[in-house]
Amino acid sequence: MPAEGERLFDRFGREYTAGTVIFKEGDVGSEMYVIQSGKVNITKKSRDVEKVLVTLGTGAFFGEMAIINNKPRSASAVVVEDSRLLVIGPKTFDAMIRGNSEIAVRMIKILAQRLQEADEQIENLMIKDANSRVVHFLTHLAAKGKQVAGGTLVEVASPELARKIGLKEQEVNDVLDKLLKAKLIRRDEHSDAFLIHDVNRLREFLEFLEMKEKFGDF
Ligand code: CMP
């Protein structure tokens, strides 16, 4: 770790082992956390089931909302891999934001990105048909995917995909099988990724599904 990171860790650092609950949704708290290494899940309870909203890794931060809004924790934070976190108290947070516009701008950008992702998720969850929901999500992933020989690589495992779009894993796998058969996607042999040969064709297919839903089978 660079000297700067070590210095920050000496001042603000705490080590957490996997499985530790840092805070729970509804708790009162006024500290923000920055992940120096490791992984943390942000989870929320829905109808008695704990759902992972996002898994955060090195460089990400969480817990800022309670400080900014002066409200209880909006979600729980659970360590999934042994982690080194910087724990920033409210006074330091305030001084950091007011004293360093670069940090403030970086934070605004990340919050805007988070809001955009939440909006995309809302848009996706409003789609009733499972086929369209999976294809819609894949086209959005493709926009951030990696360009490789033969197309766009999107890295997502079907359990994660199912969780993000609120479908059962079996439903997601059924749709993926249909897309594989139609050669709209291909499974990557080396990872949990799919190769989308032609993203525009997938978008056209989504339009076709939307038309089908609108007009029914003719
Ligand atoms: P806070 O409300 O203090 O505690 C829970 C934290 O989870 C919250 O601050 C954010 O930092 C983080 N959080 C909540 N929702 C999301 C989300 N959709 N994506 C990423 N982080 C989130």
Image: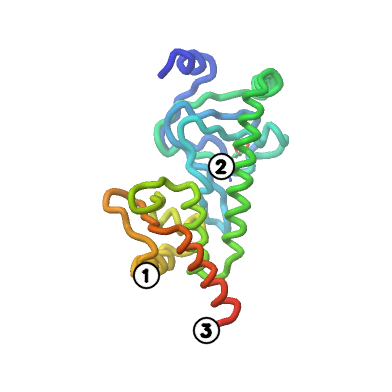
Tell me the tag on residue 113. Answer: none
Query: Amino acid type of disc 2?
Result: Ser
98 sits to left or right of 215? right
- Give the residue at mark 1: 182
Question: How many labels were placed on the picture?
Answer: 3
Q: Could you tell me which residue is drawn at 53 percent across and 39 percent down?
A: 77
Query: Amino acid type of disc 3?
Result: Asp
- Give the residue at mark 3: 217
CA gap between label 1 and label 3 equals 19 Å
Tell me the tag on residue 76. Answer: 2
Asked which quadrant contains residue 62, the reply is: top right
Please rate how many residues cluster around mark 1, counting C-alpha atoms within 10 Å: few if below 14, some from 14 to 19, many from 20: few
- Horizontal and vertical percent for residue 109? 62, 35
CA gap between label 3 and label 2 equals 45 Å
- Asked if disc 2 is less than 8 Å from ligand 1, the answer is yes
Vertical arrangement, residue 53 with respect to residue 200, above or below: above
37 sits to left or right of 46? left
Please rate how many residues cluster around mark 3, counting C-alpha atoms within 10 Å: few if below 14, some from 14 to 19, many from 20: few
Q: Could you tell me which residue is drawn at 60 percent across and 29 percent down?
A: 32
Mark 2 vs 1, N-terminal side: 2
- Horizontal and vertical percent for residue 54? 51, 45
Q: Quadrant of ligand 1?
A: top right
Quick one: quadrant of the N terminus? Answer: top left
- Horizontal and vertical percent for residue 88? 59, 24
CA gap between label 2 and label 1 equals 40 Å
Q: Say which element carries label 2.
A: strand
Query: Amino acid type of disc 1?
Result: Ala
- Horizontal and vertical percent for residue 100? 66, 20
22 sits to left or right of 196? right
Q: Say which element carries label 1.
A: loop
Asked which quadrant contains residue 198, the reply is: bottom left
118 sits to left or right of 4? right
